[in-house]
Amino acid sequence: MQDLENYKDIFAPFEKLVEIEICGEKYEVPENNELLRCFQFLNLEMISMGDFCWNGSCANCQVWVKTENGEKPALSCRTKVVENMQIVRKAEEIKI
């Protein structure tokens, strides 16, 4: 991620980065943000220019999160990041 000062207005306020796993790879993303914003943090240009509605209507941001009972589908634009979250699959439109 480039200089955060230039982009702080697009992220919800955060004080620290939390670690999550996306398809087997670990990343640090800003706490208190929806997953789609976290993906934007990791790849600003690709996610910003992607075909996402940001309100849950298109489902282009769908991910599958590991839970105690297997995998649970979720829309990344409506799901807050949680430290140690494991995303096991993601829609093709999400390019990290």
Image (cartoon, grey):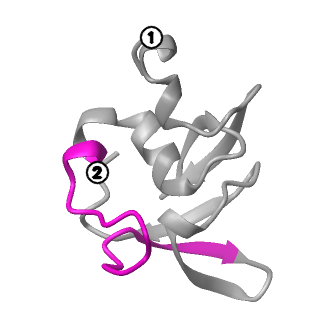
Q: Quadrant of the N terminus?
A: top left
User: Which of 83 and 52 lies nearest the eye of the viewer?
Assistant: 52
Give x and y (percent) for residue 38.
Answer: 52, 44
The residue where tag 1 is placed is: 3
User: Which of 56 and 47 lies nearest the eye of the viewer?
Assistant: 56
Which is more foreground, mark 2 or mark 1? 1
Q: Amino acid at mark 1?
A: Asp
Query: Which residues are the magenta region?
Result: 47-66
Give x and y (percent) for residue 42.
Answer: 43, 35
Q: Which mark is residue 95?
A: 2
Residue at the spot 45% in from the left edge and 70% down from the top edge = 89
Image quadrant in which you'd find residue 69: bottom right
Local secondary structure at mark 1: loop
Give x and y (percent) for residue 24.
Answer: 52, 54
Instruction: Tell me which label, 2 or 1, sits earlier in the chain.
Output: 1
Whether residue 54 is in magenta: the answer is yes
